[in-house]
Amino acid sequence: MGEPSKGLSWSRGVFGELAAPLARLIPECIFRAHERARDGHRGVGTQTLEAYGHGLHASQYEELAAGLTDLPGATAVRLQARTVMVVAGHVLYPIRYAKREVPVTVARLRRAVGLRADLIRRHGPEPMQGELDLGLEELQEQEFHKDLEQLAPEAGLVLLAYACSMSDGVMRLEWGDAELRRGDRHLLWHHHEPLDLPDARRSA
């Protein structure tokens, strides 16, 4: 549980023939987002990393949208003023989970509420264990962020979780699916697989 899938690749089961091009394109997109954020920080010249953090947050969506738009069947949706790509019926959602190289299994959200948390709860995998404090009807009636109405109820979710800092660049990148219990910030991974990073990832 929580380990990368053995045998048949999880990603190939989700994306079929698109798994290979996605595995190549996604790291390139995330790396370009880091480069843009780093260059923006250097241009601003502040002593804090605000410019880098805000730049990375915005550019990760933009680079994924630009890099994946030509894939067969890829579509774009706007979630909270950001363009998010949907490929093979799955939302591809980036999350920078750490500023240092630590396992993806330690990833947690900054907040237990909001669009990101609602997206994972609504479109992530079925819980490994049922919610003890909620009945099925109450779960179905739970209110989610209004922007999620743009997604088909049956749409899946693939998280693109990466560790990245301005000084060290992109250190780790994995994709997979995870659940998020109500009121919790810790991700419980059902599957996660590493993605190979571009050779230039160590440039800072």
Image (spheres, helix red, strand yellow):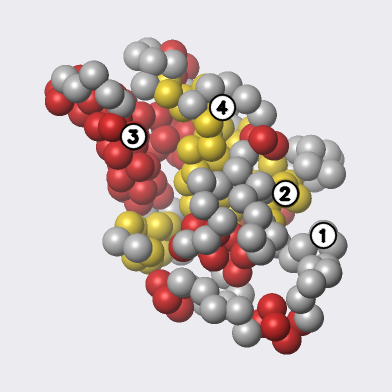
Q: Are marks 2 and 1 in contact (CB under 8 Å)?
A: yes
Q: How far apart are marks 2 and 3 (CA)?
A: 25 Å
Residue 49 % position (x, y) = 30, 26
Callout 2: SS: strand
Dot 4 amino acid type = Arg
> In this orientation, which residue lies closer to the viewer: 77 or 149?
149
Given residues 75 and 157, the one toward you in this image is 157
The amino acid at mark 3 is Gly
Q: Which of the two discs, 4 and 3, sits closer to the camera?
A: 3
Asked whether, in this view, residue 1 is left or right of residue 37, the answer is right
Q: What element carries label 1?
A: loop
Mark nearer the N terminus (1 vs 4)? 1
Q: Do the residues labelled 4 and 3 touch (CB within 8 Å)?
A: no
x, y (%) of residue 38? 28, 24
- Using residue 130 as the reference point, say whether residue 152 is left or right of it: left
Q: Residue beneath label 2, please? A: 188
Residue 70 pos. (x, y %)? 37, 53
Q: Residue at x 28, y 37 (%)?
A: 55
Q: Distance between the residues labelled 4 and 2?
A: 18 Å
Which mark, by number, is residue 128? 1
Q: Residue 150 carries which label?
A: none
- Hey, what amino acid is under mark 1? Met
The relative height of residue 185 versus residue 33 in the rendered view (above or below) is: below
Closer to the camera in the image, 58 or 175: 58
How packed mark 1 is, by other alpha carbons closer than 10 Å (few <14, some 14-19, many 20 or more), is: few
Front residue of 181/127: it is 181
Position of the N terminus by quadrant: top right
Q: Residues within 10 Å of mark 2 (few under 14, many from 20)?
A: many
Q: State the mark number for residue 53.
A: 3
